[in-house]
Image (tube, grey):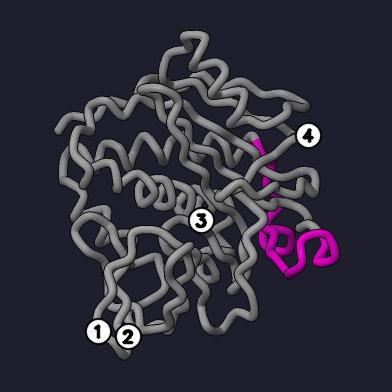
Amino acid sequence: MKLVCPPWRLECYDELTSTSDVCKERARAGAAPGLALLAHHQTKARGSRGRSWVDAGRSLALSVLLDPSSVTSDLQLGCWPFLASLAFYDALADVAPAARADLLIKWPNDILLAGKKLGGILLEYEGSAMVIGFGANLHAPPSQHDIGRQVASLDGYAEVGAEVLAEALLKQIHRWLDVWAQQGFAVLCHEWQSRAHPVGTMLTVRNESLNEQGRFIGLEPDGRLLLETGQGIKKIAAGEVLLLSQETDRVTGY
């Protein structure tokens, strides 16, 4: 497998509707892979599963345009959330080293800080192109009144500008694409698990047809979550994950 990351073309804006929506528009208009759009404010920010994202201001809102055409199998297509979360975790640790010990990836690609959601990732397709959106609270989280739960921000760990984090994140995407190309997805899986909730963590997983509680016991080779329940081991491809130490998992970010 050969994955090529083109040179990044980072464009910064004071305001956009949604970085991912604009990135998809640019893809439809013929933009080449390597486009990265950063907005300091979004007026119509979107999260996963059709949710809105509350913009608290001075946060990261970055979307990138990639060409996944060199990835041809279902197994490889399932790798993208893991690559994206590895890049996001490592970029955050690079720009805010004091936060590293408190950072955690929650399957498959939420970023937690001290047990609360700091940022998230939205992956979408536009024709043959892939758009990956990254969002994180850098200076102040949205109020609990606005979103219904407490979330985290980097405030208190480091003063980080969105442009600085965006540049670090683009470098990490490039780096992890190289690792994937040279060493395969098994290495990404291993590195992901070293940054994620450990084996043995009790989880609740919910999707349209599932509400299961059990013990996290690892990943399938294609990235599916393995959950040990009273009815046996469940292999889960999609869903919202709640660490049982958390009170709620109503996701409002990317």
Three-letter residue code for mark 2: Thr
Asked whether disc 3 touches disc 1, contact meaning CB atoms under 8 Å apart, the reply is no
Point 45% across, 62% down: residue: 239
* Residues at marks 1 and 4, CA–CA distance in whole angstroms: 45 Å
Residue 42 image offset from top left, x and y in percent? 74, 35
Residue 161: within the magenta?
A: yes
Q: What residue does disc 1 label?
A: 232
Which of the 4 quarters of the picture holds residue 164?
top right
Nearer to us of marks 1 and 4 is 1
Point 74% across, 35% down: residue: 44
**Considering the numbered disc 3 on the image, is that residue within a helix, a strand or a loop?**
helix
Tell me, yes or no, if residue 105 can be seen here: no
- Seen from the viewer's position, the closer of residues 19 and 181 is 19
Q: What residue does disc 4 label?
A: 43
Which of the 4 quarters of the picture holds residue 155?
bottom right
Which quadrant does the N terminus fall into?
A: top left
Q: Earlier in the sequence, mark 4 or mark 2?
A: 4
Magenta region: which residues? 143-162
**Considering the numbered disc 4 on the image, is that residue within a helix, a strand or a loop?**
loop
* Residues at marks 1 and 2, CA–CA distance in whole angstroms: 5 Å
